[in-house]
Image (tube, rainbow, N blue to C red):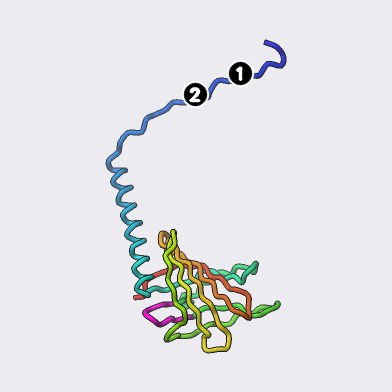
Amino acid sequence: MGFFSPHKRHANKFNYTPRYYDPAKEEREQRRAERLAEYERFMDSIVLARNYKFIPSSVQQEPAGPTRLLSNPNYELSVWGSEVDVCLPYIKGVTPPYYFVLLNYTLPFVDRYTTEQTHDGWNVTFSSTLFSATEYNFTLDIYASSGTATLTIASTWYPDVQYNGSIVSVN
């Protein structure tokens, strides 16, 4: 062979062990799939019944504010029937310095409540003035397979505020 001939290389050899049927493993996988499907049906039922609570674990002012972790168990957005209970920290301010205020309202009704099923869960939107002159638009993206959600509160006067957390049933 010449100096410039390509180096010939053989295919990598490995020992292949065939997978054998394991009935216990197949049974575990089937039970796991049934539990996951049951959880998604549970999430669907509480969203359609308007009987759920969003518990935030972090808050961030859009578009690029710092993410702050929330550990207060009293922060929540509860929906039951036509009522919505809001107890969330909210970041106000048009220009820095921004400041936190507490949105602490029980709303007997909200405007334009819509529920739309998506490929990975639900999209719930509604709006309210929160007893003020400013309209706040709430968008809750619920991921049914994991029980997590992203809440975005948009206002005409302030930048959007986004929360990440989980969805549980109202007891």
Name the front one of labels 2 and 1: 1
What is the count of numbered marks? 2
Q: Quadrant of residue 102?
A: bottom right
- Residue drawn 36% across and 70% down? 46
Q: Is 6 displayed left or right of 146 in the figure?
A: right
- Residue drawn 47% across and 82% down? 111
Q: Is 158 displayed left or right of 52 in the figure?
A: right
Q: Which residue is mark 1?
A: 8
Q: Residues within 10 Å of mark 1 (few under 14, many from 20)?
A: few
Residue 130: assigned label: none
Kindly report the secondary structure that dominates the magenta region of the rendered protein.
Answer: strand
Residue 13: assigned label: 2
Residue 134, percent across and down?
58, 85
Any magenta on residue 85?
yes
Q: Is residue 100 above or below residue 6?
A: below
Q: Residues within 10 Å of mark 2 (few under 14, many from 20)?
A: few
Magenta residue span: 78-86
Q: Secondary structure at mark 2?
A: loop
Is the C-beta separation of discs 2 and 1 under 8 Å?
no
Q: For the residue marked with disc 2, what is the amino acid?
A: Lys
First reached walking from the N terminus: tag 2 or tag 1: 1
Give how far apart the Cα atoms at labels 2 and 1 are.
15 Å
- Residue drawn 56% across and 70% down? 162
Any magenta on residue 135?
no
Q: Secondary structure at mark 1?
A: loop
Residue sitting nearer the eye, 166 or 117: 117
Q: Quadrant of the N terminus?
A: top right
